[in-house]
């Protein structure tokens, strides 16, 4: 969920290679980054109350606690046993919340090595099983697909990736039938979902809008 330009990505994260989880940390941190950690908390489930140590990275925009709580109230009990993908993981708050609430598996995709390292450190400290992948989301979605039951789509607002990434998810075979897709945008941002995505819930918290879609393939 970091809010920053994709033109910086090539400088910060190595290209994704199919079958490889990149574990190399950034060799240098941008001068504008604040290395002091911020803190978020897991709201529910077996890790309830656990803190996530998160670097105060430029543009990092974690989903507000109130919006996250609303989202998971909508999703219960569908999180239990679900295969989850947090495609622009940032702080990992959405994906790790899903693991806490009983998801069968969680994949956290984050292009910034420093943030990916933070995700791995939080996972070790919390004894979480989430897989961390350091990669550009669009590049990762061009690898061999596997179906997910629940996808969190919260890209950097400045990058305007909602349409292109949603089409990659739909056309690339990444979504189970049925599947839940959560899309987070600025309050006034238009979003035209792919065919077969039905809006189930929507809410606003401050300047952020959250939409929850149910994806299913129409019977021919």
Image (cartoon, rainbow, N blue to C red):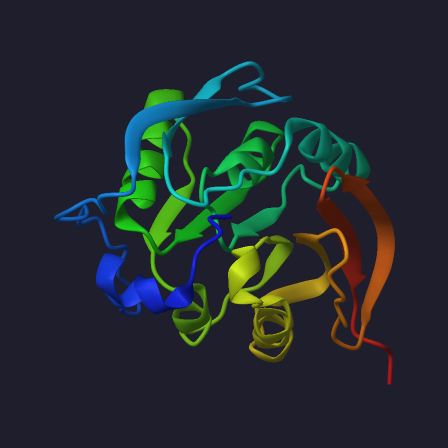
* 94 over 83 or under it: above or below: above
Task: Name, please, the residue furthest toward the bottom.
Answer: 220
Image point 27% across, 67% down: which residue? 10
Task: Name, please, the residue furthest toward the left.
Answer: 27
Q: Position of residue 152 (x, y in %)?
A: 61, 51
Tell me if I can see residue 208 in this picture: yes
**In front here: 186 or 91?**
186
Image point 74% across, 48% down: which residue? 210
Residue 148 image-quadrant placement: bottom right
Q: Position of residue 86 (x, y in %)?
A: 53, 50
* 83 over 6 or under it: above or below: above
**In front here: 186 or 113?**
186
Q: Classify the position of the C terminus by image quarter.
A: bottom right
Q: Position of residue 168 (x, y in %)?
A: 57, 75
**Disc count in the image?**
0
Q: Position of residue 32 (x, y in %)?
A: 28, 43
**In front here: 84 or 197?**
197
Tell me if I can see residue 77 in this picture: no
Image point 77% across, 57% down: which residue? 188
**In front here: 129 or 85?**
85
* 179 over 104 or under it: above or below: below
Task: Name, please, the residue furthest toward the top.
Answer: 49
- Residue 215 appears left or right of 165: right
Residue 103 image-quadrant placement: top right
Residue 101 image-quadrant placement: top right
Image point 85% across, 59% down: which residue? 199
- Residue 29 appears left or right of 83: left
């Amino acid at each position: 969920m970091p809010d920053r330009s994709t033109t910086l990505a090539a400088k910060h994260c190595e290209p994704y290679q199919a079958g490889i989880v990149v574990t190399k940390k950034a060799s240098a941190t941008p001068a504008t980054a604040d290395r002091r950690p911020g803190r978020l908390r897991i709201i529910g489930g077996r890790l309830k109350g656990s803190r996530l140590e998160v670097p105060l990275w430029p543009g990092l925009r974690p989903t507000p606690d109130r919006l996250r709580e609303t989202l998971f109230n909508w999703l219960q009990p569908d999180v239990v046993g679900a295969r989850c993908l947090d495609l622009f993981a940032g702080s990992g708050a959405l994906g790790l919340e899903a693991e806490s609430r009983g998801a069968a598996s969680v994949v956290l995709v984050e292009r910034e090595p420093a943030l990916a390292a933070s995700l791995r450190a939080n996972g070790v400290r919390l004894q979480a099983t989430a897989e961390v992948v350091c990669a550009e989301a669009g590049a990762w979605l061009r690898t061999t697909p596997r179906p997910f039951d629940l996808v969190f789509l919260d890209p950097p607002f400045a990058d305007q990736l909602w349409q292109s990434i949603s089409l990659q998810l739909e056309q690339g075979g990444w979504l189970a039938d049925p599947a839940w897709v959560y899309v987070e945008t600025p309050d006034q941002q238009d979003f035209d979902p792919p065919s077969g995505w039905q809006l189930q819930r929507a809410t606003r918290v401050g300047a952020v809008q959250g939409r929850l879609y149910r994806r299913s393939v129409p019977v021919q």
